[in-house]
Image (tube, coloured by chain):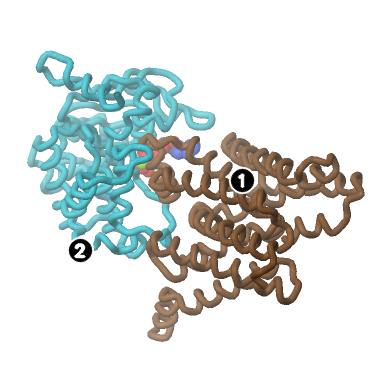
Amino acid sequence: MWSYGFVQRALVGGALIAVTCSLLSFFVVVRRLAFVGMGISHAAFGGVALGLAAGVDPVLSAGGSCALVALGIGWLSRKGRVHEDTVIGILFVSAMALGVVLVRVANAYNLDLMSYLFGSILALSWSDVALIAAIGFLALLYEMLFFKELLFLSFDRETAIASGLPVLAVDYGFLVMLSLVIVVSIKLVGIILVSALLVIPAAAGMQLSRNYRGVMAVSALAGLASVLLGLYVSFHYDLASGAAIVLVLFALFLLSFLASPRRVYVRRRQAGG
Amino acid sequence: MRECRVKDFFAAGNGSPRLVIDVEDLWVRRDSHYVLEGITFSLREGTFLGVIGPNGAGKTTLVKAMLGLIKPSRGRITVLGMSPGELKHELHHIGYMPQQVLFDPYFPVSVYDVVMMGRTCCIGTFRLPRRGDREVVQESIAAVGLQGMEGKPIGELSGGQQKRAFLARAICLETSILLLDEPTAGLDMDSQENFMDLLMRLKEEKGLTVVFVSHDVNILARFADEMVCINRTMHLHGRPREVLGSERLKEAYRCEFDFLAGKGTGGGEA
Ligand SMILES: Nc1ncnc2c1ncn2[C@@H]1O[C@H](COP(=O)(O)OP(=O)(O)OP(=O)(O)O)[C@@H](O)[C@H]1O
Ligand SMILES: [Mg+2]
Protein backbone atom coordinates (compact mmCIF):
# COMPACT_ATOMS: atom_id res chain seq x y z
CA MET A 1 0.00 0.00 0.00
CA TRP A 2 2.90 2.35 0.75
CA SER A 3 4.01 2.62 -2.85
CA TYR A 4 0.91 4.55 -3.91
CA GLY A 5 1.50 8.27 -4.15
CA PHE A 6 -1.86 9.16 -2.65
CA VAL A 7 -1.15 6.95 0.39
CA GLN A 8 2.17 8.67 0.98
CA ARG A 9 0.51 12.06 0.74
CA ALA A 10 -2.30 11.01 3.06
CA LEU A 11 0.17 9.63 5.60
CA VAL A 12 2.40 12.70 5.67
CA GLY A 13 -0.54 15.11 5.66
CA GLY A 14 -2.43 12.99 8.18
CA ALA A 15 0.50 12.84 10.59
CA LEU A 16 0.87 16.63 10.43
CA ILE A 17 -2.87 17.14 10.98
CA ALA A 18 -2.86 14.67 13.86
CA VAL A 19 -0.04 16.34 15.75
CA THR A 20 -1.40 19.86 15.20
CA CYS A 21 -4.98 19.04 16.12
CA SER A 22 -4.11 16.99 19.18
CA LEU A 23 -1.77 19.61 20.59
CA LEU A 24 -4.48 22.26 20.11
CA SER A 25 -7.09 19.92 21.56
CA PHE A 26 -5.72 20.45 25.07
CA PHE A 27 -6.94 24.05 25.09
CA VAL A 28 -10.11 23.15 23.22
CA VAL A 29 -10.97 20.78 26.08
CA VAL A 30 -9.90 22.87 29.09
CA ARG A 31 -11.45 26.03 27.67
CA ARG A 32 -14.66 24.12 26.86
CA LEU A 33 -14.41 24.95 23.16
CA ALA A 34 -15.57 21.54 21.89
CA PHE A 35 -18.81 23.04 20.59
CA VAL A 36 -16.93 26.02 19.15
CA GLY A 37 -14.79 23.59 17.16
CA MET A 38 -17.92 21.85 15.89
CA GLY A 39 -19.49 25.18 14.97
CA ILE A 40 -16.44 26.37 13.04
CA SER A 41 -16.00 23.11 11.16
CA HIS A 42 -19.65 22.88 10.17
CA ALA A 43 -19.49 26.46 8.94
CA ALA A 44 -16.92 25.17 6.45
CA PHE A 45 -19.78 23.40 4.67
CA GLY A 46 -21.23 26.74 3.59
CA GLY A 47 -17.80 27.81 2.38
CA VAL A 48 -17.13 24.60 0.47
CA ALA A 49 -20.53 24.81 -1.22
CA LEU A 50 -19.87 28.42 -2.15
CA GLY A 51 -16.53 27.42 -3.63
CA LEU A 52 -18.06 24.55 -5.62
CA ALA A 53 -20.87 26.80 -6.85
CA ALA A 54 -18.64 29.71 -7.80
CA GLY A 55 -15.78 27.63 -9.14
CA VAL A 56 -13.29 28.88 -6.53
CA ASP A 57 -10.96 26.58 -4.60
CA PRO A 58 -13.28 25.27 -1.83
CA VAL A 59 -10.44 25.41 0.71
CA LEU A 60 -10.16 29.16 0.20
CA SER A 61 -13.88 29.84 0.54
CA ALA A 62 -14.12 27.45 3.51
CA GLY A 63 -11.25 29.31 5.15
CA GLY A 64 -13.17 32.54 4.74
CA SER A 65 -16.42 31.18 6.16
CA CYS A 66 -14.68 29.48 9.10
CA ALA A 67 -12.71 32.57 10.06
CA LEU A 68 -15.87 34.70 9.78
CA VAL A 69 -17.85 32.35 12.00
CA ALA A 70 -14.96 32.08 14.50
CA LEU A 71 -14.65 35.86 14.80
CA GLY A 72 -18.44 36.16 14.88
CA ILE A 73 -18.58 33.74 17.80
CA GLY A 74 -15.91 35.70 19.65
CA TRP A 75 -17.46 39.08 18.91
CA LEU A 76 -21.14 38.29 19.54
CA SER A 77 -20.50 36.45 22.79
CA ARG A 78 -18.21 39.26 23.99
CA LYS A 79 -20.99 41.76 23.37
CA GLY A 80 -23.03 39.85 25.94
CA ARG A 81 -26.76 39.21 25.95
CA VAL A 82 -26.24 35.93 24.06
CA HIS A 83 -24.28 32.97 25.39
CA GLU A 84 -21.47 31.52 23.34
CA ASP A 85 -23.21 28.21 22.70
CA THR A 86 -26.33 30.04 21.52
CA VAL A 87 -24.26 32.14 19.12
CA ILE A 88 -22.67 28.98 17.72
CA GLY A 89 -26.08 27.33 17.44
CA ILE A 90 -27.25 30.28 15.37
CA LEU A 91 -24.21 30.77 13.15
CA PHE A 92 -23.29 27.24 12.17
CA VAL A 93 -26.76 26.07 11.19
CA SER A 94 -27.16 29.23 9.13
CA ALA A 95 -23.88 28.57 7.33
CA MET A 96 -24.91 24.95 6.73
CA ALA A 97 -28.34 25.96 5.47
CA LEU A 98 -26.70 28.39 3.08
CA GLY A 99 -24.44 25.55 1.99
CA VAL A 100 -27.40 23.28 1.23
CA VAL A 101 -29.02 25.96 -0.92
CA LEU A 102 -25.79 26.73 -2.76
CA VAL A 103 -25.14 23.04 -3.43
CA ARG A 104 -28.59 22.77 -4.99
CA VAL A 105 -27.98 25.87 -7.08
CA ALA A 106 -24.64 24.56 -8.31
CA ASN A 107 -26.07 21.06 -8.77
CA ALA A 108 -23.05 19.70 -6.94
CA TYR A 109 -24.50 16.67 -5.12
CA ASN A 110 -21.66 14.46 -6.16
CA LEU A 111 -18.78 12.45 -4.86
CA ASP A 112 -16.71 15.56 -4.38
CA LEU A 113 -19.11 16.89 -1.78
CA MET A 114 -19.24 13.55 0.05
CA SER A 115 -15.46 13.53 0.35
CA TYR A 116 -15.57 16.99 1.89
CA LEU A 117 -18.15 15.81 4.39
CA PHE A 118 -16.45 12.61 5.51
CA GLY A 119 -12.90 12.89 4.27
CA SER A 120 -11.14 10.96 1.56
CA ILE A 121 -7.77 9.25 1.55
CA LEU A 122 -7.50 10.17 -2.14
CA ALA A 123 -8.00 13.87 -1.62
CA LEU A 124 -4.59 15.32 -0.84
CA SER A 125 -2.17 16.72 -3.40
CA TRP A 126 1.41 17.59 -2.47
CA SER A 127 0.47 21.25 -2.44
CA ASP A 128 -2.31 20.43 0.06
CA VAL A 129 0.29 18.71 2.22
CA ALA A 130 2.52 21.77 2.00
CA LEU A 131 -0.40 23.97 3.06
CA ILE A 132 -1.12 21.65 6.00
CA ALA A 133 2.53 21.84 7.05
CA ALA A 134 2.57 25.64 6.84
CA ILE A 135 -0.69 26.13 8.78
CA GLY A 136 0.27 23.49 11.32
CA PHE A 137 3.59 25.19 11.90
CA LEU A 138 1.88 28.56 12.32
CA ALA A 139 -0.71 27.21 14.78
CA LEU A 140 1.83 25.35 16.90
CA LEU A 141 4.15 28.35 16.88
CA TYR A 142 1.26 30.47 18.12
CA GLU A 143 0.42 27.96 20.81
CA MET A 144 4.03 27.77 21.93
CA LEU A 145 4.55 31.53 22.04
CA PHE A 146 1.34 32.18 23.97
CA PHE A 147 1.34 28.98 25.99
CA LYS A 148 1.60 30.47 29.47
CA GLU A 149 -0.94 33.16 28.62
CA LEU A 150 -3.37 30.56 27.24
CA LEU A 151 -2.87 28.40 30.32
CA PHE A 152 -3.47 31.27 32.76
CA LEU A 153 -6.56 32.50 30.88
CA SER A 154 -8.00 29.00 30.70
CA PHE A 155 -7.43 28.31 34.38
CA ASP A 156 -8.56 31.54 35.99
CA ARG A 157 -9.81 34.10 33.52
CA GLU A 158 -10.57 36.87 35.97
CA THR A 159 -7.19 36.96 37.67
CA ALA A 160 -5.47 36.59 34.32
CA ILE A 161 -7.23 39.70 33.06
CA ALA A 162 -6.50 41.47 36.35
CA SER A 163 -2.81 40.77 35.89
CA GLY A 164 -2.76 42.57 32.55
CA LEU A 165 -2.73 39.72 30.03
CA PRO A 166 -3.44 40.67 26.39
CA VAL A 167 -6.81 38.90 26.45
CA LEU A 168 -8.08 39.92 23.03
CA ALA A 169 -4.94 38.85 21.19
CA VAL A 170 -4.89 35.50 22.95
CA ASP A 171 -8.62 34.79 22.57
CA TYR A 172 -9.03 35.80 18.94
CA GLY A 173 -5.65 34.41 18.00
CA PHE A 174 -6.64 30.99 19.26
CA LEU A 175 -9.99 31.08 17.43
CA VAL A 176 -8.32 32.07 14.17
CA MET A 177 -5.66 29.35 14.49
CA LEU A 178 -8.38 26.84 15.27
CA SER A 179 -10.34 27.72 12.15
CA LEU A 180 -7.25 27.64 9.91
CA VAL A 181 -6.32 24.19 11.19
CA ILE A 182 -9.89 22.96 10.73
CA VAL A 183 -9.97 24.19 7.14
CA VAL A 184 -6.78 22.45 6.06
CA SER A 185 -7.87 19.24 7.81
CA ILE A 186 -11.27 18.81 6.16
CA LYS A 187 -10.11 17.22 2.90
CA LEU A 188 -8.66 14.26 4.77
CA VAL A 189 -10.88 14.09 7.87
CA GLY A 190 -14.09 15.69 6.66
CA ILE A 191 -16.24 18.59 7.83
CA ILE A 192 -18.48 16.46 10.03
CA LEU A 193 -15.67 14.60 11.77
CA VAL A 194 -12.78 17.01 12.11
CA SER A 195 -13.91 18.35 15.48
CA ALA A 196 -13.33 14.88 16.94
CA LEU A 197 -9.59 15.34 16.39
CA LEU A 198 -9.84 18.59 18.35
CA VAL A 199 -11.51 17.01 21.36
CA ILE A 200 -10.87 13.29 21.81
CA PRO A 201 -7.03 13.29 21.99
CA ALA A 202 -6.94 15.67 24.98
CA ALA A 203 -9.92 13.92 26.56
CA ALA A 204 -7.92 10.69 26.43
CA GLY A 205 -4.87 12.52 27.80
CA MET A 206 -6.87 13.89 30.72
CA GLN A 207 -7.79 10.33 31.68
CA LEU A 208 -4.16 9.30 31.97
CA SER A 209 -2.36 12.34 33.35
CA ARG A 210 -3.03 15.06 35.89
CA ASN A 211 -0.50 17.47 34.46
CA TYR A 212 -0.76 19.33 31.20
CA ARG A 213 2.63 18.11 30.01
CA GLY A 214 1.49 14.52 30.30
CA VAL A 215 -1.92 15.32 28.85
CA MET A 216 -0.34 16.88 25.77
CA ALA A 217 2.11 14.04 25.29
CA VAL A 218 -0.64 11.43 25.49
CA SER A 219 -2.93 13.40 23.17
CA ALA A 220 -0.23 13.81 20.54
CA LEU A 221 0.44 10.07 20.64
CA ALA A 222 -3.25 9.19 20.53
CA GLY A 223 -3.87 11.58 17.64
CA LEU A 224 -0.93 10.26 15.65
CA ALA A 225 -1.82 6.61 16.28
CA SER A 226 -5.45 7.15 15.32
CA VAL A 227 -4.65 8.89 12.05
CA LEU A 228 -2.06 6.35 10.93
CA LEU A 229 -4.19 3.36 11.97
CA GLY A 230 -7.32 5.01 10.59
CA LEU A 231 -5.72 5.58 7.19
CA TYR A 232 -4.57 1.96 7.10
CA VAL A 233 -8.11 0.76 7.83
CA SER A 234 -9.55 3.24 5.35
CA PHE A 235 -7.25 1.96 2.60
CA HIS A 236 -7.90 -1.72 3.23
CA TYR A 237 -11.66 -1.59 3.65
CA ASP A 238 -12.33 1.32 1.32
CA LEU A 239 -13.92 3.47 4.03
CA ALA A 240 -14.11 7.24 4.33
CA SER A 241 -10.83 8.17 5.98
CA GLY A 242 -12.42 10.56 8.48
CA ALA A 243 -14.81 7.92 9.77
CA ALA A 244 -12.04 5.36 10.18
CA ILE A 245 -9.82 7.85 12.05
CA VAL A 246 -12.61 8.87 14.43
CA LEU A 247 -13.53 5.27 15.22
CA VAL A 248 -9.92 4.42 16.07
CA LEU A 249 -9.74 7.58 18.17
CA PHE A 250 -12.87 6.60 20.03
CA ALA A 251 -11.43 3.16 20.74
CA LEU A 252 -8.28 4.78 22.11
CA PHE A 253 -10.39 7.02 24.32
CA LEU A 254 -12.25 4.02 25.71
CA LEU A 255 -8.93 2.31 26.44
CA SER A 256 -7.56 5.34 28.24
CA PHE A 257 -10.80 5.64 30.19
CA LEU A 258 -10.53 2.03 31.32
CA ALA A 259 -6.88 2.48 32.23
CA SER A 260 -7.38 5.80 33.98
CA PRO A 261 -5.93 5.93 37.50
CA ARG A 262 -8.67 8.40 38.38
CA ARG A 263 -11.31 5.84 37.50
CA VAL A 264 -9.58 3.15 39.54
CA TYR A 265 -9.54 5.57 42.43
CA VAL A 266 -13.26 6.24 42.11
CA ARG A 267 -14.03 2.54 41.95
CA ARG A 268 -11.97 1.78 45.02
CA ARG A 269 -13.64 4.57 46.94
CA GLN A 270 -17.04 3.24 46.05
CA ALA A 271 -16.03 -0.29 47.03
CA GLY A 272 -14.57 0.98 50.27
CA GLY A 273 -17.82 2.63 51.26
CA MET B 1 10.16 50.80 28.81
CA ARG B 2 7.32 48.95 30.52
CA GLU B 3 9.03 49.09 33.89
CA CYS B 4 9.72 52.79 33.88
CA ARG B 5 6.28 54.20 34.72
CA VAL B 6 6.32 52.52 38.10
CA LYS B 7 10.02 53.17 38.71
CA ASP B 8 9.49 56.85 37.86
CA PHE B 9 6.65 56.94 40.30
CA PHE B 10 8.82 55.69 43.13
CA ALA B 11 11.86 57.70 42.09
CA ALA B 12 9.97 60.99 42.00
CA GLY B 13 8.98 62.89 45.09
CA ASN B 14 10.86 64.41 47.95
CA GLY B 15 11.22 61.71 50.53
CA SER B 16 7.75 61.99 51.97
CA PRO B 17 5.59 58.88 51.49
CA ARG B 18 3.76 58.95 48.17
CA LEU B 19 0.07 58.47 47.60
CA VAL B 20 -0.03 54.99 46.10
CA ILE B 21 -3.78 54.81 45.79
CA ASP B 22 -5.99 57.84 45.37
CA VAL B 23 -9.73 57.42 45.00
CA GLU B 24 -11.79 60.55 44.54
CA ASP B 25 -15.58 60.72 44.47
CA LEU B 26 -15.93 57.24 42.97
CA TRP B 27 -19.35 56.23 41.67
CA VAL B 28 -19.83 52.76 40.21
CA ARG B 29 -22.99 51.44 38.63
CA ARG B 30 -23.82 47.78 38.18
CA ASP B 31 -26.83 47.14 36.00
CA SER B 32 -29.43 49.74 36.92
CA HIS B 33 -28.32 51.03 40.32
CA TYR B 34 -25.26 52.50 41.96
CA VAL B 35 -23.36 50.11 44.22
CA LEU B 36 -20.72 52.69 45.17
CA GLU B 37 -21.54 56.34 45.67
CA GLY B 38 -18.99 59.04 46.30
CA ILE B 39 -16.14 56.97 47.76
CA THR B 40 -13.09 59.08 48.57
CA PHE B 41 -9.88 58.03 50.28
CA SER B 42 -6.17 57.90 49.65
CA LEU B 43 -3.44 55.60 50.79
CA ARG B 44 0.20 56.36 51.46
CA GLU B 45 2.99 53.96 50.55
CA GLY B 46 3.40 51.16 53.04
CA THR B 47 -0.04 51.46 54.61
CA PHE B 48 -2.19 48.46 55.56
CA LEU B 49 -5.80 49.38 54.86
CA GLY B 50 -8.58 47.22 56.26
CA VAL B 51 -11.88 47.39 54.38
CA ILE B 52 -15.06 46.30 56.11
CA GLY B 53 -18.74 46.51 55.31
CA PRO B 54 -21.74 44.21 55.23
CA ASN B 55 -22.38 41.69 52.43
CA GLY B 56 -23.18 43.43 49.19
CA ALA B 57 -21.67 46.68 50.43
CA GLY B 58 -19.47 47.01 47.36
CA LYS B 59 -16.07 45.98 48.77
CA THR B 60 -15.26 43.59 45.95
CA THR B 61 -16.54 46.16 43.47
CA LEU B 62 -14.15 48.73 44.94
CA VAL B 63 -11.18 46.38 44.59
CA LYS B 64 -12.10 45.53 41.00
CA ALA B 65 -12.50 49.19 40.15
CA MET B 66 -8.96 49.83 41.43
CA LEU B 67 -7.71 47.13 39.06
CA GLY B 68 -9.63 48.67 36.18
CA LEU B 69 -11.83 45.58 35.81
CA ILE B 70 -14.95 47.69 36.38
CA LYS B 71 -15.35 51.13 34.86
CA PRO B 72 -16.43 53.90 37.23
CA SER B 73 -19.36 56.00 36.04
CA ARG B 74 -18.00 59.03 37.82
CA GLY B 75 -14.93 60.06 39.78
CA ARG B 76 -11.24 59.35 39.54
CA ILE B 77 -8.99 56.47 40.56
CA THR B 78 -5.25 56.88 40.53
CA VAL B 79 -3.04 53.90 41.35
CA LEU B 80 0.75 54.34 41.37
CA GLY B 81 0.14 57.73 39.76
CA MET B 82 -1.72 56.21 36.81
CA SER B 83 -5.29 56.16 35.57
CA PRO B 84 -6.85 52.71 35.01
CA GLY B 85 -6.15 53.03 31.28
CA GLU B 86 -2.44 53.60 31.83
CA LEU B 87 -2.37 51.02 34.58
CA LYS B 88 -3.42 48.33 32.07
CA HIS B 89 0.19 47.83 31.05
CA GLU B 90 1.54 47.87 34.62
CA LEU B 91 -0.92 45.52 36.28
CA HIS B 92 1.84 43.04 37.03
CA HIS B 93 2.95 45.41 39.77
CA ILE B 94 -0.24 44.67 41.68
CA GLY B 95 -0.80 41.40 43.46
CA TYR B 96 -4.48 40.45 43.45
CA MET B 97 -6.21 37.70 45.30
CA PRO B 98 -9.87 37.44 44.31
CA GLN B 99 -12.53 36.56 46.86
CA GLN B 100 -13.30 33.43 44.91
CA VAL B 101 -11.36 31.67 42.21
CA LEU B 102 -13.71 29.74 39.97
CA PHE B 103 -11.68 26.97 38.42
CA ASP B 104 -12.20 23.49 37.08
CA PRO B 105 -11.00 21.02 39.76
CA TYR B 106 -9.85 18.63 37.02
CA PHE B 107 -7.69 21.28 35.36
CA PRO B 108 -4.37 19.46 34.92
CA VAL B 109 -1.97 21.89 36.60
CA SER B 110 0.13 21.51 39.74
CA VAL B 111 0.46 23.96 42.62
CA TYR B 112 3.79 25.03 41.17
CA ASP B 113 2.22 25.73 37.77
CA VAL B 114 -0.55 27.80 39.37
CA VAL B 115 1.91 29.97 41.32
CA MET B 116 4.03 30.37 38.19
CA MET B 117 0.94 31.74 36.41
CA GLY B 118 1.20 34.74 38.71
CA ARG B 119 4.48 35.61 37.06
CA THR B 120 3.16 35.36 33.51
CA CYS B 121 3.29 39.09 32.89
CA CYS B 122 6.60 39.59 34.74
CA ILE B 123 8.20 36.97 32.51
CA GLY B 124 6.85 38.80 29.48
CA THR B 125 5.33 37.68 26.20
CA PHE B 126 7.27 35.14 24.11
CA ARG B 127 9.56 34.33 27.07
CA LEU B 128 10.05 31.27 29.22
CA PRO B 129 10.48 31.35 33.00
CA ARG B 130 14.10 31.92 33.99
CA ARG B 131 15.98 30.76 37.04
CA GLY B 132 15.00 33.86 38.99
CA ASP B 133 11.33 33.18 38.29
CA ARG B 134 11.59 29.59 39.46
CA GLU B 135 13.33 30.68 42.66
CA VAL B 136 10.72 33.31 43.47
CA VAL B 137 7.96 30.76 42.88
CA GLN B 138 9.64 28.26 45.21
CA GLU B 139 10.08 30.95 47.86
CA SER B 140 6.44 31.99 47.63
CA ILE B 141 5.30 28.39 47.95
CA ALA B 142 7.50 27.93 51.00
CA ALA B 143 6.28 31.22 52.45
CA VAL B 144 2.67 30.03 52.49
CA GLY B 145 3.71 26.67 53.91
CA LEU B 146 2.97 24.51 50.90
CA GLN B 147 6.48 23.13 50.41
CA GLY B 148 6.39 19.47 49.47
CA MET B 149 3.08 19.98 47.67
CA GLU B 150 4.45 21.75 44.58
CA GLY B 151 3.72 18.80 42.32
CA LYS B 152 0.19 18.10 43.56
CA PRO B 153 -2.68 18.82 41.20
CA ILE B 154 -4.39 22.00 42.40
CA GLY B 155 -7.78 20.25 42.49
CA GLU B 156 -6.51 17.73 45.06
CA LEU B 157 -5.79 20.37 47.70
CA SER B 158 -8.23 21.29 50.44
CA GLY B 159 -10.05 24.62 50.17
CA GLY B 160 -7.72 26.34 52.63
CA GLN B 161 -4.63 24.95 50.92
CA GLN B 162 -5.94 26.21 47.59
CA LYS B 163 -6.38 29.64 49.16
CA ARG B 164 -2.76 29.55 50.27
CA ALA B 165 -1.68 28.60 46.76
CA PHE B 166 -3.58 31.60 45.39
CA LEU B 167 -1.95 33.82 47.98
CA ALA B 168 1.44 32.53 46.87
CA ARG B 169 0.41 33.41 43.31
CA ALA B 170 -0.47 36.96 44.41
CA ILE B 171 2.81 37.56 46.23
CA CYS B 172 5.24 36.08 43.72
CA LEU B 173 5.29 39.26 41.64
CA GLU B 174 7.56 42.23 42.05
CA THR B 175 4.59 44.03 43.48
CA SER B 176 4.27 47.19 45.42
CA ILE B 177 0.55 46.79 46.09
CA LEU B 178 -1.43 43.81 47.31
CA LEU B 179 -5.19 43.78 46.89
CA LEU B 180 -6.58 40.93 48.97
CA ASP B 181 -10.30 40.18 48.91
CA GLU B 182 -11.15 38.17 52.02
CA PRO B 183 -7.90 36.21 51.96
CA THR B 184 -8.29 34.62 55.39
CA ALA B 185 -11.92 33.53 55.07
CA GLY B 186 -12.00 29.75 55.32
CA LEU B 187 -8.54 29.35 56.81
CA ASP B 188 -8.05 27.57 60.12
CA MET B 189 -6.79 29.53 63.15
CA ASP B 190 -3.20 28.42 62.76
CA SER B 191 -3.12 29.18 59.02
CA GLN B 192 -4.63 32.60 59.69
CA GLU B 193 -1.82 33.39 62.14
CA ASN B 194 0.83 32.15 59.70
CA PHE B 195 -0.81 34.05 56.90
CA MET B 196 -0.83 37.31 58.84
CA ASP B 197 2.77 36.80 60.00
CA LEU B 198 3.82 36.28 56.41
CA LEU B 199 1.85 39.27 55.20
CA MET B 200 3.30 41.60 57.82
CA ARG B 201 6.82 40.34 57.07
CA LEU B 202 6.35 40.98 53.36
CA LYS B 203 4.89 44.38 54.10
CA GLU B 204 7.94 45.35 56.18
CA GLU B 205 10.49 43.87 53.78
CA LYS B 206 9.09 45.29 50.57
CA GLY B 207 7.24 48.33 51.91
CA LEU B 208 4.05 46.91 50.45
CA THR B 209 0.81 48.82 50.44
CA VAL B 210 -1.94 46.38 51.39
CA VAL B 211 -5.68 46.62 50.85
CA PHE B 212 -7.27 43.89 52.92
CA VAL B 213 -11.00 43.24 52.62
CA SER B 214 -12.29 41.17 55.50
CA HIS B 215 -15.21 40.49 57.79
CA ASP B 216 -12.77 39.59 60.57
CA VAL B 217 -12.60 42.74 62.70
CA ASN B 218 -10.25 41.03 65.15
CA ILE B 219 -7.56 40.63 62.54
CA LEU B 220 -8.04 44.14 61.24
CA ALA B 221 -7.97 45.63 64.75
CA ARG B 222 -4.62 43.94 65.33
CA PHE B 223 -2.88 44.55 62.03
CA ALA B 224 -4.44 47.40 60.06
CA ASP B 225 -2.93 50.88 60.06
CA GLU B 226 -6.13 52.38 58.74
CA MET B 227 -9.64 51.16 58.17
CA VAL B 228 -12.56 52.14 56.02
CA CYS B 229 -16.11 50.99 56.42
CA ILE B 230 -18.28 51.19 53.34
CA ASN B 231 -21.86 50.34 52.66
CA ARG B 232 -22.51 51.78 49.23
CA THR B 233 -21.35 55.11 50.55
CA MET B 234 -18.28 55.72 52.63
CA HIS B 235 -19.21 55.53 56.29
CA LEU B 236 -15.92 55.76 58.14
CA HIS B 237 -12.21 56.16 57.57
CA GLY B 238 -9.64 56.28 60.33
CA ARG B 239 -7.51 54.28 62.71
CA PRO B 240 -8.95 50.87 63.59
CA ARG B 241 -9.89 51.87 67.14
CA GLU B 242 -11.69 54.98 65.97
CA VAL B 243 -13.57 53.10 63.26
CA LEU B 244 -14.50 50.11 65.38
CA GLY B 245 -15.47 52.27 68.33
CA SER B 246 -17.63 54.61 66.32
CA GLU B 247 -21.36 54.86 66.71
CA ARG B 248 -21.70 55.25 62.95
CA LEU B 249 -20.41 51.70 62.42
CA LYS B 250 -23.72 50.39 63.72
CA GLU B 251 -25.44 52.66 61.28
CA ALA B 252 -23.46 51.17 58.40
CA TYR B 253 -24.28 47.64 59.47
CA ARG B 254 -27.82 48.60 60.49
CA CYS B 255 -27.58 46.61 63.68
CA GLU B 256 -26.77 46.92 67.35
CA PHE B 257 -23.64 45.28 68.66
CA ASP B 258 -20.34 46.26 70.11
CA PHE B 259 -17.48 45.62 67.68
CA LEU B 260 -14.81 46.07 70.35
CA ALA B 261 -16.47 43.90 72.97
CA GLY B 262 -14.86 40.63 71.88
CA LYS B 263 -11.56 39.59 73.43
CA GLY B 264 -8.40 40.25 71.51
CA THR B 265 -9.66 43.45 69.94
CA GLY B 266 -8.10 45.68 72.55
CA GLY B 267 -4.61 45.26 71.13
CA GLY B 268 -4.91 48.59 69.41
CA GLU B 269 -3.09 49.76 66.38
CA ALA B 270 -0.22 47.68 65.06
N1 LIG C 1 -21.71 40.87 38.31
C1 LIG C 1 -22.60 41.69 38.90
N2 LIG C 1 -23.60 42.22 38.20
C2 LIG C 1 -24.51 43.03 38.76
N3 LIG C 1 -24.47 43.40 40.04
C3 LIG C 1 -23.49 42.91 40.81
C4 LIG C 1 -22.50 42.02 40.29
N4 LIG C 1 -21.66 41.68 41.28
C5 LIG C 1 -22.11 42.32 42.37
N5 LIG C 1 -23.19 43.05 42.10
C6 LIG C 1 -23.94 43.89 43.05
O1 LIG C 1 -23.07 44.87 43.55
C7 LIG C 1 -23.24 45.04 44.92
C8 LIG C 1 -21.90 44.99 45.62
O2 LIG C 1 -21.33 43.71 45.45
P1 LIG C 1 -19.88 43.33 45.99
O3 LIG C 1 -19.53 42.00 45.44
O4 LIG C 1 -18.97 44.44 45.70
O5 LIG C 1 -20.17 43.24 47.57
P2 LIG C 1 -19.14 42.87 48.72
O6 LIG C 1 -19.07 44.04 49.61
O7 LIG C 1 -17.89 42.35 48.17
O8 LIG C 1 -19.95 41.72 49.48
P3 LIG C 1 -19.41 40.38 50.22
O9 LIG C 1 -19.07 40.77 51.62
O10 LIG C 1 -20.62 39.49 50.20
O11 LIG C 1 -18.28 39.84 49.44
C9 LIG C 1 -24.20 43.97 45.39
O12 LIG C 1 -25.42 44.60 45.75
C10 LIG C 1 -24.41 43.07 44.23
O13 LIG C 1 -25.77 42.76 44.09
MG1 LIG D 1 -16.85 40.63 48.21
For the residue marked with disc 1, what is the amino acid? Answer: Leu
* Figure check: A17 above or below B218: below
Q: Nearer the viewer, residue B247 or A1?
A: A1
Quarter of the view holding residue B63: top left
For the residue marked with disc 2, what is the amino acid? Answer: Gly
Say few, some or many: other residues with alpha carbon within 10 Å of mark 1 (under 14 / 14 to 19 / 20 or more). many
Q: Position of residue A213 (x, y in %)?
A: 39, 60
Q: Position of residue A114 (x, y in %)?
A: 80, 59
Residue at horizontal 67 percent and vertical 60 percent from the top: A189
B181 relative position to A142: left or right: left
Q: Colour of chain A?
A: brown
Q: Which mark is residue A180?
A: 1
Q: Nearer the viewer, residue A264 or A43?
A: A43
Q: Position of residue B198 (x, y in %)?
A: 14, 47
Residue at horizontal 37 percent and vertical 48 percent from the top: B100
Residue at horizontal 42 percent and vertical 80 percent from the top: A264
Position of the N terminus of chain A by quadrant: bottom right
For disc 2, the marked residue is B148
B69 relative position to A88: left or right: left
Q: Nearer the viewer, residue A224 or B208?
A: A224
Quarter of the view holding residue B222: top left
Q: Secondary structure at mark 1?
A: helix
Which chain contains the residue that carries disc 1? A
Badge 2 and badge 1 in a common chain: no
- Do the numbered discs 2 and 1 sit on residues whose CB atoms are within 8 Å? no
Q: Secondary structure at mark 2?
A: loop
Which chain corresponds to the colour cyan? B
